[in-house]
Amino acid sequence: MFSQSKPNIIWLMAEDMSLDLEVYGLKDVKTPNLNKMAEDGVRFDNCFVTNPICSPSRSAMMVGVNQLLINAGNHRSNRGVVLNENYKPFTYWLREQGYTCILGHHGVFDKGRKIDVNFKHKALGKWDGKTEFGLFDKRDCFEEEDQPFFAQIQLKVTHRGDWWNDIRNQSKHPVNPENVELPEFIADHPMTRLDWAKYLDQVEYMDNEVGMIFKELEDKGMSDNTIVIFIGDNGRCNIRGKGYLYDSGLRIPMIIYHPKGIESNKIRKDIISATDITATILDFAGANIPSYMTSKPIFKEKSTRDYVFAARDTWDEIEDKSRAVTSGKWKYIRNDKPEIPYDAHQAYLEFYRPALHVMRKLNQEGALIEYQKFFFESTKPKEELYDLVKDPFELNNLANNPNYKSILIELRKKTLEAYKKVTPNKKINIPVITDAVNVLNYVKNEKPDLYQQMQQGVEIGFQALRLNIK
C-alpha cells in the first residue's frame, strides 16, 4: 500500500465535540482545514462513543472494548487499579509492530497531552501491565527517526475552560452571537447565543491547529506516508450534550485522511463505534486484532453494526446509571435511576454551563417551551425512545406511544443483551474525589457576588477559584 513498509498514523482528538463543523453542515462556523481533510478523505456521519464523558470514553478507545468490561465506566475511577491481564492498551500492540508512540504536540493549545483513562497508567515508559504502565514513548514532536510513528494529539481548546474568552478576544473574526442557530432544546437568549458563539470560536481555533499539523507533515516530507484521523472524545459541553445519552452527547465527528489507501470525498453512513478506531489503527499498522477487542477495523470490510451500545454512570458526585442503544435511526435510553434528574446540580457543571443557569431561571419564570422544560423536571423518564430521522433533536419521547411498542420492546431487548456482554466478572469502583463541590461551596459562602454572576450565565473561572482555596 505504501512505498515504505508502514505508514505513520496521527490521531487528532478534539475534546467535547459534536457534529459542529462546517463539513457537517453547520452554517455558523468556518473549518476550512477539516473541510479539506474530508474532501481528501472519508467523513463518517454515524460514529458514536460508548460513554458521553471523557475518561470512560477514552478508556474504551485506549483498549478497544466497552469501558464497562474493564471497570472504567465511572468517571476518573480506578486510577490505581491494574488493568485486567487479559487486556492491553493498543499502544502496546503498536510498539510490537515497531512504532514510536508519541503523546501531544508542541504547537497545539496546552500541548495536547491529555490521556485520562480509568486504569493504572503513566504517560511515558514501557508497559507490561504488572510493574510497568507506560503508554507512550515520547512527547510533543515527530521526527524522521521516529518513523514509523503513532502520535495521539489532544485538541484541548474546545474543552470547556477558563481560556474561552481569551481565544475569542484573539480571534480576528469572532463568531457573531446574533447569527448563530441554536439547537431547539436550548432557549434563545443573549447569554446562550454568546456562549454558543464562544464555543464556535474554539472550534475555528482548533481547525487552524489541524491545518498546522498538515503543514508540518508537508514541510517534513511525511504527507505521502501519514494517515490522519480526526475524532471527538464525546459530545459538546452544553445542555443535553457531554454526560448525556442523547445524540449531542454520543455522536461525534470522525474524518480519516489516508494518502493512498482510500477513496477521497467519500461520506459513510454505516454505524461506527468510537472503539472501532482502535482496531482500525492496528489494521493500518499491520497488526493482528487481539481477540478480546470488540472494535472492528472499518476499512477491512464495511461495518455491519446494527447499533452502538452506550452507558452513562457516575460522574463526580452524581451517581447515575443509564444505558442506551443507537442505530442512527432510533435511540433508546433506559434510566435505571430516574430519581436523579437531568439537571442534577453537579458542582463542576455549575461553573461551565452558562445555558444551564439561564434556562433554570427561565424555567422558574415559566418562560421555557415544553421540550426545553423537559431537562429541568425533578425526575427522568424510566425509558426514552426517539426517531432520530424525524426528530433529530430528540424532543418527542415515543416510549409511551402504543404505535411504537414493537420498536420499544426490540430496543429494550438489544440494550439488555448488549449490557450483559460487557458486564465484568468482578465490579470494581474506587472513585477519585472531586474538589468541585468544595469550590462551589466556597463561591456560595465567600464570593456571593461571583455566585450571583454565575447564576446569570457568566463563567466566573473554575481553575483560578480552585487554586484560591488550596
Image: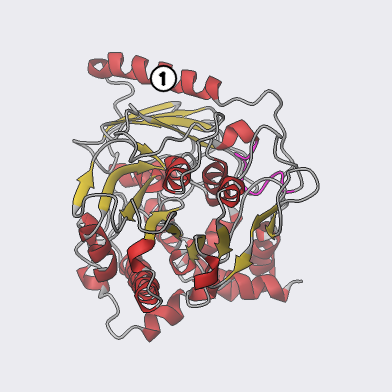
- Is residue 426 or residue 245 the one in the foreground? 426
Q: Position of residue 442 (x, y in %)?
A: 69, 67
Asked if 106 appears above or below 329 in the picture, the reply is below
Q: Element under label 1?
A: helix
Asked if 439 appears above or below 292 in the picture, the reply is below
Q: Quadrant of the C terminus?
A: bottom right
Is residue 72 part of the magenta span, yes or no? yes
Asked if 286 appears above or below 169 in the picture, the reply is above
- Is residue 49 or residue 130 the one in the foreground? 130
Query: Tell me, what colour scheme is on the image?
Result: secondary structure
- Is residue 43 or residue 80 the one in the foreground? 43
Q: Is residue 166 visible?
A: yes
Q: Position of residue 134 (x, y in %)?
A: 69, 55
Name which quarter of the figure residue 350 lies in: bottom right
Name which quarter of the figure residue 412 lies in: top left
Per the image, the residue denoted by label 1 is 414
Q: In the image, what residue occupies the spot 33% across and 47% down?
A: 372
- The amino acid beneath tag 1 is Lys
Magenta-highlighted residues: 71-79
Asked if 346 appears above or below 414 in the picture, the reply is below
The reply, left or right, for residue 260 in relation to residue 113 is left
Query: What predominant SS class does the magenta segment belong to?
Result: loop
The reply, left or right, for residue 39 in relation to residue 191 is left
- Is residue 247 or residue 363 the one in the foreground? 247
Q: Position of residue 152 (x, y in %)?
A: 51, 60
Is residue 315 part of the magenta span, yes or no? no
* Residue neighbourhood size for the residue with mark 1, other residues' Cα within 10 Å, grouped as few (<14), some (14–19), many (≥20): some
Q: Is residue 191 visible?
A: no
